[in-house]
């Protein structure tokens, strides 16, 4: 069975733990903030409708097989909304999943080679590439094998799931940069130098509310250094990224803070450690682009509509006799019944024939030319297809907005429908403007790719006479047509959502009439287009009062006036470090309760809560995740008290907490509050990457064993547990300590021996229940 990445052995154990965490959340034993951080890293997002979830499925390079897509369709019908949503990240989503069905869905996906790991949160996200890679004559070489191999490698590494912020990677197969490598964290552009394959590499780009263009990292690197560069940047980001502020935590902000020289210096510190290790090179396994023989009857189609469809949406591949077909979907949605029809048809030709497009559409490949008639009949029969319309509608992108997203302000999906209805009933020559990219986001975040649009919109709140109405900022001039020369769209003006269909009609009318006077769309904008946008926004600027026309205050697709009451907190940026602020708040709120009139029993319980939160608050900074109250106190003693990160005088009250002796805490109120203050002061003394100033503490107690990192490799089979250990050691300094957790049996027999063979020291091996703790010193 073809798959587009390898499922790591650790995923089974991770699913078991996630199942326990879901149960813990439901019974109240796991804090909602912590649970959010856990589930989001598995691509599980809560929707606006309470107790319903979206599940995002990883599709490396956009690849998915007919068998896999059919499985997803069945899951959508059985447990969700009945449709599959194609995203601007070349992956797919299921919506309206109830929490009690999440684990069933995840395990069913795993059974066919699909995973949601890294679908959100502060993780290595879906790795993208040009969706025509491997089939177009225009490419320098096929980059898809690199995206697939790198995905498998990243998914197998435990440090891919708890970074300062999301880490996005893309590969473009030619200079046209169809994977947008300069607007992502790490981008590779295919290049051949002196007859050798390699890449031009960009890093520290990103869109979002504050777009920053990526910077050239390497003018050329050989193809076998892709993993080394990715690994080095990931480790460097993990060490130095800002974990305090979500607003400035992306790699792009690290470059901005450090500037080029220091950023490159820190990157090279990590890169130089591994760049000559050829054993780390990716194992590339290209997927053949071919179609198997089939006895499917050929349907002969002719006529103007068929010819127009081929002109718009069909491209000949470099493989003789095969075609690629662009399937345009309304709002990026594919219904269950349509997915079944499509996958049944595609299965006739093999497994390698579907790619998820960043424009929320599907690109089919390896379709024999003689079966184009069959494909045409099938696609035109899909309920959600737009393939019968001019290509401008296939180029239109919109995020889900406030329909499901907790951060959404406006409803881009409703607006997209309204724009399409307006334009297809007009007398405009839409074929003449078919290459124009209109992108719409429901808020300043860039899920709708508005920063790289020819004409972009992102949602905002308009106000008039004390009432709110849906409105959009207007941008123009985004350009990603040449690697290294990306231009972000420029914000020009703003306009009410209800006037955008008319605005677009007027703009396209002028552009269509004047298009032939200009070499490019950008030349049109520079000459008169930007001014035209301002003129049209002025034309539609006046908003009637609520009493005059309340429809202006109701968004496209909505039934009531705009309200911000349902806007929630961000899902995608949730991480385990969020628990630090949760514990800080618990301590502050509980201390306030103690100032009032409380019973002896209440006071004992409040003091225990403060003690517990103080001990738990910074465990995450050491890579620790306590599952019980007892573990909280044990880990705090081992990693904070005995190492003198906090004063040893606090040991006695921590022991009382470990033993659960709440009644003994009554006489230690001042000392417990002092511990809470000491922990908070320690947190304040940490740098932005939440590392301690260890030097001073170690001078005070030079005999203390300072463990820099703790990794849980239980459930990871040999030799992958050693590979993971080796990777962790590679990013540490000489003399630093790593503690690993290993299963009994082969892991404890093999891994320490392999570590010693690499020259490192085994300081401790301790049996802890059904597993082992191994302390390693890097040499």
Image (cartoon, rainbow, N blue to C red):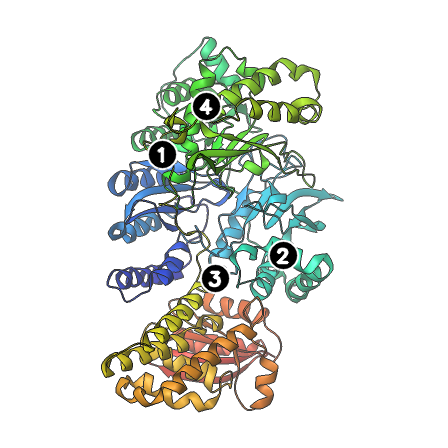
Structural distance between the alpha carbons of marks 1 and 3: 39 Å
| Marks 4 and 2, the one that precedes in the sequence | 2
Which residue is under mark 2?
A: 229
Which residue is under mark 1?
A: 561
Pick the residue in front: 555 or 62.
555
Counting other residues with Cα less than 10 Å from the Cα at mark 1, is it few (<14), some (14-19), or many (20 or more)? some
Location of residue 202 with respect to 275 vertically, above or below: above
Kindly identify the residue that appears in the image at 62 percent across and 75 percent down: 733
The answer to the question of whether label 1 and label 3 lie on touching residues, with beta carbons closer than 8 A, is no
Q: Nearer the viewer, mark 2 or mark 3?
A: 3
- What kind of element bears circle 3? loop
Structural distance between the alpha carbons of marks 1 and 4: 20 Å
Residue 698 appears in view: yes
| Marks 2 and 1, the one that precedes in the sequence | 2
Location of residue 547 with respect to 700 vertically, above or below: above
Q: Nearer the viewer, mark 1 or mark 3?
A: 1
Pick the residue in front: 124 or 207.
207
Pick the residue in front: 231 or 642.
642
- Check the picture and name the quadrant holding the C terminus: bottom right
Q: Nearer the viewer, mark 2 or mark 1?
A: 1
Residue 149 at x, y = what percent? 52, 51
Structural distance between the alpha carbons of marks 4 and 3: 41 Å
Kindly identify the residue that appears in the image at 63 percent across and 52 percent down: 204
Structural distance between the alpha carbons of marks 2 and 1: 50 Å
- What kind of element bears circle 2? helix
Q: Nearer the viewer, mark 1 or mark 4?
A: 1
Which residue is under mark 3?
A: 162
Residue 146 appears in view: no
Residue 213 at x, y = what percent? 65, 45
Q: Which mark is residue 419?
A: 4
Kindly identify the residue that appears in the image at 48 percent across and 62 percent down: 162
Counting other residues with Cα less than 10 Å from the Cα at mark 3, is it few (<14), some (14-19), or many (20 or more)? many
């Amino acid at each position: 069975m073809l798959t587009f990445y390898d499922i790591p052995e650790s995923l089974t154990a991770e699913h078991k733990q996630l199942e326990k965490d879901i149960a813990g959340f439901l019974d109240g034993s796991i804090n909602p903030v912590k649970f959010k951080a856990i589930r989001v890293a598995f691509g599980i997002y809560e929707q606006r409708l309470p107790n319903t979830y979206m599940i995002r499925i990883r599709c490396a390079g956009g690849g998915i097989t007919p068998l896999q897509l059919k499985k997803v369709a069945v899951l959508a019908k059985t447990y969700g909304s009945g449709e599959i949503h194609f995203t601007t990240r070349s992956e797919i989503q299921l919506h309206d999943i109830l929490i009690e069905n999440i684990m069933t869905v995840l395990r069913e996906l795993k059974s066919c080679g699909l995973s949601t790991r890294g679908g959100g949160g502060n993780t290595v996200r879906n790795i993208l590439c040009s969706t025509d890679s491997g089939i177009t004559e225009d490419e320098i070489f096929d980059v898809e094998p690199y995206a697939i191999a790198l995905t498998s490698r990243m998914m197998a590494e435990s440090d891919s799931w708890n970074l300062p912020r999301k880490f996005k990677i893309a590969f473009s197969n030619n200079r046209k940069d169809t994977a947008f490598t300069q607007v992502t964290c790490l981008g590779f552009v295919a290049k051949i130098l002196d007859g050798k394959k390699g890449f031009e590499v960009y890093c520290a780009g990103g869109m979002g509310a504050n777009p920053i263009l990526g910077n050239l990292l390497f003018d050329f690197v050989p193809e076998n250094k892709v993993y080394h560069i990715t690994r080095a940047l990931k480790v460097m980001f993990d060490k130095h990224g800002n974990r305090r502020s979500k607003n400035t935590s992306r790699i792009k902000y690290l470059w901005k803070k450090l500037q080029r020289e220091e950023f490159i210096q820190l990157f090279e510190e990590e890169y130089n450690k591994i760049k000559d290790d050829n054993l780390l090179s990716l194992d590339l396994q290209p997927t053949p682009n071919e179609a198997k023989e089939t006895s499917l009857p050929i349907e002969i189609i002719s006529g103007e509509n068929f010819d127009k469809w081929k002109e718009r949406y069909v491209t000949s591949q470099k493989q003789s006799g095969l075609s690629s077909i662009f399937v345009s979907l309304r709002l990026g949605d594919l219904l269950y019944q349509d997915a079944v029809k499509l996958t049944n048809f595609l299965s006739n030709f093999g497994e390698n024939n579907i790619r998820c497009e960043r424009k929320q559409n599907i690109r089919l490949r390896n379709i024999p030319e003689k079966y184009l008639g069959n494909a045409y009949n099938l696609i035109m029969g899909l309920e959600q297809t737009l393939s019968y319309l001019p290509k401008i509608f296939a180029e239109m992108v919109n995020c889900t907005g406030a329909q499901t997203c907790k951060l959404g302000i406006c409803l881009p999906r409703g607006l997209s429908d309204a724009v399409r209805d307006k334009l297809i009933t007009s007398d405009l020559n839409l074929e003449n403007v078919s290459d124009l990219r209109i992108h719409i986001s429901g808020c300043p975040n860039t899920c709708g790719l508005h920063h790289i649009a020819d004409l972009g919109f992102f949602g905002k709140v308009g106000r008039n006479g004390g009432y709110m109405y849906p409105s959009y900022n207007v941008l123009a001039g985004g350009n990603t047509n040449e690697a290294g020369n990306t231009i972000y769209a420029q914000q020009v003006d703003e306009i009410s959502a209800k006037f955008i269909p008319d605005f677009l009609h007027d703009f396209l009318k002028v552009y269509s009439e004047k298009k032939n006077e200009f070499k490019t769309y950008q030349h049109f904008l520079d000459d008169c287009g930007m001014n035209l946008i301002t003129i049209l926004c002025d034309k539609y600027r006046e908003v009637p009062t609520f009493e005059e026309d309340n429809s202006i205050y109701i968004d496209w697709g909505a039934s009531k006036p705009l309200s911000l009451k349902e806007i929630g907190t961000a899902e995608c940026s949730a991480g385990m470090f969020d628990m630090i602020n949760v514990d800080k708040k618990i301590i502050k709120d509980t201390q306030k309760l103690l100032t009032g009139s409380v019973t002896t029993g209440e006071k004992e319980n409040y003091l225990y809560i403060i003690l517990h939160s103080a001990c738990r608050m910074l465990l995450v900074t050491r890579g620790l995740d306590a599952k019980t109250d007892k573990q909280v106190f044990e880990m705090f003693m081992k990693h904070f008290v005995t190492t003198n990160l906090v004063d040893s005088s606090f040991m006695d009250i921590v022991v009382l907490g470990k033993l659960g002796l709440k009644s003994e805490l009554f006489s230690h109120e001042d000392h417990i509050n002092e511990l809470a203050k000491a922990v908070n002061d320690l947190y304040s003394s940490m740098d932005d990457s939440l590392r301690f100033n260890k030097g001073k503490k170690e001078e005070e107690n030079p005999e203390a064993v300072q463990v820099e990192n703790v990794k849980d490799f239980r459930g990871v089979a040999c030799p992958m547990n050693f590979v993971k250990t080796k990777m962790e050691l590679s990013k540490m300094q000489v003399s630093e300590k790593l503690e690993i957790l290993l299963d009994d049996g082969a892991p404890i027999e093999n891994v320490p021996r392999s570590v010693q063979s690499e020259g490192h020291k085994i300081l401790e091996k301790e049996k802890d229940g059904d597993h082992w703790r191994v302390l390693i010193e890097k040499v």
